[in-house]
Amino acid sequence: MFFVLGLFFLGLTGCRPAEIPLPTRLPTAVMVQTFTPRPTPTLTPIPTATETAVPTSTPVIQRPSATPLPTNTPPATATTPAKAITQTVGLSSEARPIVDYQFKNGARHVVFVGGMHGGYEWNTISLAYEVIDYFQVNLEQIPDGLTLHVIPSANPDGQFLVTGSDGRFAPTDVISDTVAGRFNGNQVDLNRNWDCQWQARGLWREQWVSGGTRPFSEPENAALRDYLLALQPQAVIFWHSALNGVFAAGCPQTYQPSYELATVYGLAAGYPVYEVFTSYTVTGDASDWLTTQGIASMTVELTSHEGTDWRQNLDGILAVLAHLE
């Protein structure tokens, strides 16, 4: 018995089992998600004098790598600037006003229009209000022979759906899904409702949208049509987003005064200049219809759906004003 107890105490004091090493921690599995970029729209740029040595499919205008922040634009206010005269062009399908801000009183008119696609392109409305604020304190930069018109929102129904506002709004007011704001209160795409190759169903990217029951069936477009025809402006420029370019208008062939206007704006603003939009067939476009009335018109596509490309567009606007002086 003493022998057995001795063996027991010996085991406690000197004979420990060999330590078993802990298993090495295995690396956590990493899930890799493959992102397939959306195909870039095929656009046919117009060569300028500096582009003769390069393929026409590659614009050569050097553009800023990032959208500069406004540096000399007064802060937005909720009131109408004192130096701007406002006029209601008409009412939307939900009875919201379409407002024109007018600067100076020259014999020739130039019109800038934002928000044709309402809240889906809310940054074009923001740009319009930046332009209004800028000329409120820089009225002398408008030639005396011109009247400058800025219509911030041609689709106030779509704007209200996304921002909750008929007038000015902050970017923080914008809801995350803005697609529904592209259309007016009747669910019509207003830039498929003008009388240039109009179709009841218009194409937007890869989906069909309503072009209305007939050309100018929508009260917004009927009011804007009548207003512009009464003004007989020298030029009408529409702001859209976001294809990063300037597009001349025509129905169906490019209208030469529109191409000249697009070139002036595009070169000054640093946007690529295109004679025609070729990504997909567009019917019932506002800018195209205006050329059938002998009015030079064009579209500016901002580089994103959030920024206003302020410095670029201010340079383009000032160049157009000087060109029309």
Image: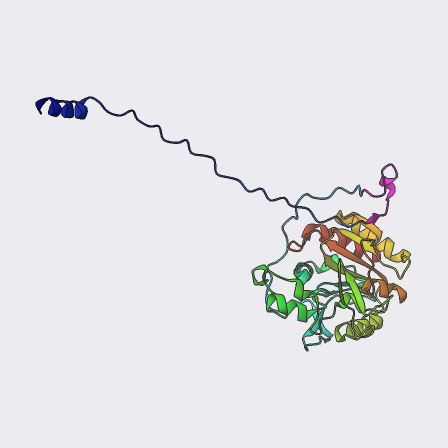
**Residue 258, image x, y percentages:** 86, 57
Q: Which residue lies furthest to the bottom in this view?
A: 95
In the visual, does 174 lie left or right of 53? left
Residue situated in front as seen by the camera: 264 or 25: 25
**Residue 108, image x, y percentages:** 83, 65
Residue situated in front as seen by the camera: 268 or 167: 167
* Image-quadrant location for residue 47: top right
In the visual, does 46 lie left or right of 181? right
Residue situated in front as seen by the camera: 44 or 92: 44
**Residue 260, image x, y percentages:** 87, 53
Asked whether residue 235 appears in the rendered view, the answer is no
Q: Is residue 69 above or below residue 149?
A: above
The residue located at (80%, 53%) in the rendering is 279
Q: Main secondary structure of the magenta part?
A: loop
**Residue 200, image x, y percentages:** 81, 70
* Image-quadrant location for residue 97: bottom right
Which range of residues does the magenta coloring cover? 43-58
The quadrant in which the C terminus is found is bottom right
* Image-quadrant location for residue 261: bottom right
Q: Is residue 210 magenta?
A: no
The residue located at (86%, 54%) in the rendering is 259
Asked whether residue 20 appears in the rendered view, the answer is yes
Q: Residue furthest front?
A: 1
Q: Does the magenta stretch include residue 44?
A: yes
Q: Which residue lies furthest to the left in this view?
A: 2
